[in-house]
Amino acid sequence: MQFFKKIKNKSKQNIIQVLLRLKRYKLDESLLIFSEARSGSTWLMELFQNVPGVIVNWEPLHLEKGVVPENYKFGWRPCLPLNNTKIKYKKLFKRIFRFQTCNSWTTQFLKFKDIRYSKYVLTKFVRGNQLLPWVVNTFPNLKYRPILLLRHPITTCVSRLKTFDKMTSQNILSLKNEGNFIIPDCINNQRFLKHQNYLNNLKTKLEVEIAVWCINNVNILNHKNNNKWMVVFYEDLVLDPEKTFKAVLKGLNINLLSELLKKIEFRKASASNFDNQLKSKPQEQLESVFKNFNNDELLNIQAIFDYFELKVYSAFNSYPIK
């Protein structure tokens, strides 16, 4: 029985991939979400699935399961400099944005009917934030500005350690940094080399995680072209998801009929909310993590923010500084 089920699923995936390659999605109508892992990108993606004609291209840059050739050495956090003009990278992302390269991982959210009526490909990336300047420079005719979804680095990194490293609230704060940060074996990893000594001298593993968050986001926030992507704060989504999503649609010049908006379950936990701990009080959801830290621990984290010149978040505030 299990064998036939696998054959059925394999056949379904093969048909879906053929249908996608037969479609002709417009490159300039690509919808793009960039975010750190555990920052709410799946939730925002699911909200966009309520827009007629939108289909999801799921994490095509995943190191093991994505569609990037291994010899490209993208690593978990790929970076392409603004002046990189290698045609192979442009061709790769052109195919990704138009869903012309895909596999069972990237198409896992698709059904046959979705493809038939689809018009727009929404590609979601976690850990791809360093690509943003290159993307908007390489594809200047994008109709919709890419979205950069941000969540407070403290809550993001705590969630990441709990989810991926199976750590608890207690040992996250106590686990010491062993001072042996390993430079990722990937192209354009100079940003890690530059701060290796600093990372090795931090006190805890959480502090290292937060510093890496800064390495991969602060220069994007301060970039001269940051008006070419739309910054959305996870905290705004939690406090008022309907208002925030409407603002995002307006910023992209996408009109969604009011009757469709009324059908959206804005407080529904996303598929990536693995512990299903969506709290009934939004403020509590955003502030609860900070109660686990003492003043000295927050001072240490604020020192990291100051070192990297992060201005939009404070270690002593659960909310973005706007």
Image (cartoon, rainbow, N blue to C red):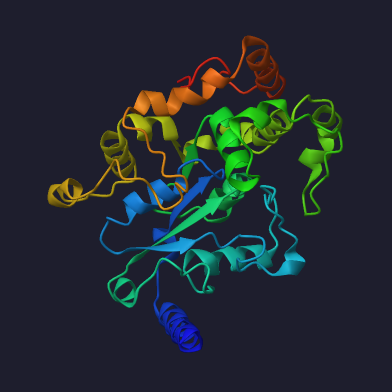
- Residue 179 horizontal side relative to residue 207, left or right: right
Quadrant location, the N terminus? bottom left
Q: Residue at 82% of width from left, 27% of height from top?
A: 198
User: Which quadrant of the view contains residue 54?
Assistant: bottom left
The picture quadrant where one finds residue 309 is: top right
**Which image quarter holds the C terminus?**
top left
- Viewer can see residue 222: no
The x, y position of residue 291, in whole percent, is 52, 18
As displayed, is residue 296 above or below residue 118?
above
Is residue 20 positioned above or below 191 on the image?
below
Q: Position of residue 209 (x, y in %)?
A: 68, 35
Front one among 32 and 239 = 239
Residue 130 seen anywhere in this rendered image of the structure: yes
Total number of numbered discs in the rendering: 0
Q: Residue 98, image x and y in percent?
A: 47, 68
- Which residue is the extreme one toward the left? 259
Q: Residue at x 53, y 56 (%)?
A: 139
Please tell me whether residue 259 is drawn above or below residue 281 in the rendered image: below
Residue at 83% across, 44% down: 182
163 and 116: which is toward the camera: 163
In this rendering, position of residue 77 left or right of residue 263: right
